[in-house]
Every structure is written in structure tokens, then in C-alpha cells.
Image (tube, rainbow, N blue to C red):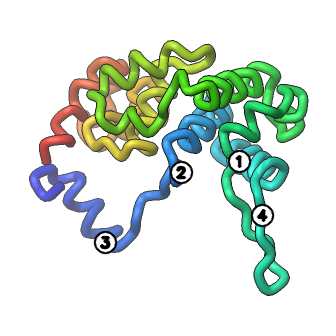
Amino acid sequence: MDEDPVLKDVKKRLYGLKAGSMGATIFESIVKAIIQQQISLQASFWMISSLVTRFGEHKEINKVFYYDFPTASTLAASGPEEIRRCGLSWRKAEYIKGVAEKVVDGEFDPEGLKKRSNEEVIEELRKFKGIGRWTSELILCAGLKRKDVIPADDLGVRRAVSVFYFDGRSLPGDEVRKFVEKWGRI
């Protein structure tokens, strides 16, 4: 980070702040990334909270409920209409159920993605209905904590890179993708 003047300044101003996690497991990161597609973060947080309270196991400690993220088996056993009650579209509910079923059936090991290259992860994730490049890159960046990739086709990401590094000149996703590769080496 110290080799990049912009990131060095951000690190200095936000020293001690830890980036939020997409989840304790890669499965959780995948589900959250599907939910976050094409909606505001605020809306996605509400939907994720609803999913967790509806399907996650909970414990009560001192009259406060604490919830675990739903397991793949719980979501696989649920109907898309039940998942949809968390505010999700039919398609997103079906996509989440589809991933959960592959995990339960042993056809997909989300944790195994940790050992694979970025392109291998993207290729594997894109086999799932409802997961494209943006979602795969979000999972790589926020779920797998890869520093050399971001969801480069995201308008907010493209704007930020354009403003901080290219004097506001608009960049296509491919150029942003190429630019951030160096972050994995610093």
C-alpha cells in the first residue's frame, strides 16, 4: 500500500479501520454477493438480515438473540418462495437455492476456491445460473480477500478509480481491471 500514493493516504487517514467481511465462509460470501446484485447496499443489508433471522440458527444470551448465517443445507431444503419472503426476487431466490443444492450434493466446495487462481474462481462461479463476472469479482475481492481484483464493471468502482487515479477520465471495466492488478503486488 505504501508504494501507491493514493492508497498510502487512505491507509494513513483510516489507520486501524478493518474492511468489512462478506462472511465467515465462502458460501456466505456467495449468497451475499447474489443478494447485492443490482440493488443498493442498504436494501441488500435489509434482505441479508431478513434471510439470517428467518433461516439462521439463533441463540439467546442475556435476552439478546444472536444469529448464525443459514447453512447450505437449510437453504437447499427451503423453497424459493420461502427465500423470496426475505425481499429477494424469484430469480435471486432460485440462484441461492441452486448454489446451496450443489454444496449439499457435494458437487461444489466453496472453500476449495481459496486454492484457485482468480480466473479459475471466475470460471467456476460463472457456471452457476445468476453469477456473472461482477459477482465473481466481488466474491474474490470481499469474500476471498484478493487484493488484485475488484468488481471492475461496477459504476461506483469505475468512478472512484477514475477520480483518484485518472483525473476523472472515465475508464471501461477492462482498463480498471488491468490497473488494479498491481495492487496484488504492493
Inter-mark Cα distance, 2 to 3 = 22 Å
Q: Give the residue at mark 1.
A: 70
Kindly check if marks 3 and 1 are in contact, taking CB atoms under 8 A apart as contact: no
Q: Secondary structure at mark 1?
A: loop
Q: Secondary structure at mark 3?
A: loop
Inter-mark Cα distance, 1 to 4 = 10 Å
Quarter holding the N terminus is: bottom left
Q: Amino acid at mark 1?
A: Pro
Q: Give the residue at mark 2.
A: 23
Inter-mark Cα distance, 3 to 1 = 33 Å
> Within 10 Å of the Cα at label 4, are there few (<14), some (14-19), or many (20+) other Cα atoms?
some
Quadrant for residue 140, please give it. top left
Which residue occupies the foreground of this view, 83 or 153? Answer: 83
Q: Secondary structure at mark 4?
A: strand
Q: Give the residue at mark 3.
A: 15
Q: Give the residue at mark 4.
A: 58
